[in-house]
Image (cartoon, rainbow, N blue to C red):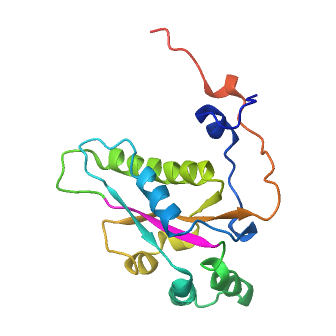
Amino acid sequence: MFNDSTTPLSLLATRRSGKPRDLVAPGPDADQLDRILTIAARTPDHGKLAPWRFVVVPAGARAALGRVITDAYRIERPQAAAAEIAALEQFASQAPALVVVLSSPKTESHIPLWEQELSAGAACMNLLHAAHALGFAGGWLTGWAAFSDTVRDAFGAAPERIAGFIFLGTPAKQLEERPRPDMSKIVSTWHG
């Protein structure tokens, strides 16, 4: 499709999600992560509200985040199976770098909440594109933890919501292309 891997369109066309459990070192260093987040913030933002924010979870804090997640899960689901708990315990420890993106709407603004939430999603996508442009892969996860008020409260408070856990690193193996939508089924022309 694209032969020159350095063109912006080629970078967009070749970005792939990496499974966080398959992302290994090296991950972005502090300067690279700062650059990635700066680019992530260059997203459509009606009203210039910055209705999102980024929380970097360093390696030394990953186990504590794992405990927050598993403790919250045990409270909400006391009958949880050991396998569920084990999966949640390792959730925060995947990949070399973790950024939690929070949708942080400005409720006092006249800008609709939906537009602010879309901007948060666009910030996540910009983050993934910036990481790819620097040679890393990323995985954007949500799952139960993203919808837990208790987990969210570890980073902020309502009306904020976790837009995603963005894991960054180097793929342990070549990322495979996944099936993409049939464009004829998702693109149409409106004729009035």
In the image shown, does 101 or 71 lie closer to the viewer?
A: 101
State whether the magenta stretch is mostly helix, strand or loop: strand
Residue 116 part of the magenta-drawn span: no
Residue lying farthest to the top in this orientation: 191
Tell me if residue 55 can be seen.
yes
Give percent across and percent down for residue 18.
70, 58
Residue at 68% across / 53% down in the picture?
Answer: 17
The answer to whether residue 121 is above or below residue 7 is below
Residue lying farthest to the front in this orientation: 31
Q: Which residues are magenta?
A: 96-104
In the picture, the quarter occupied by the C terminus is: top left
Give percent across and percent down for residue 89.
64, 86
In the image shown, does 144 or 4 lie closer to the viewer?
A: 4
Tally the numbered discs: 0
Give percent across and percent down for residue 171.
75, 61
Residue 100 part of the magenta-drawn span: yes
The answer to whether residue 35 is above or below residue 146 is above
Tell me if residue 65 can be seen.
no
Give percent across and percent down for residue 41.
39, 52
Residue at 49% across / 76% down in the picture?
Answer: 57
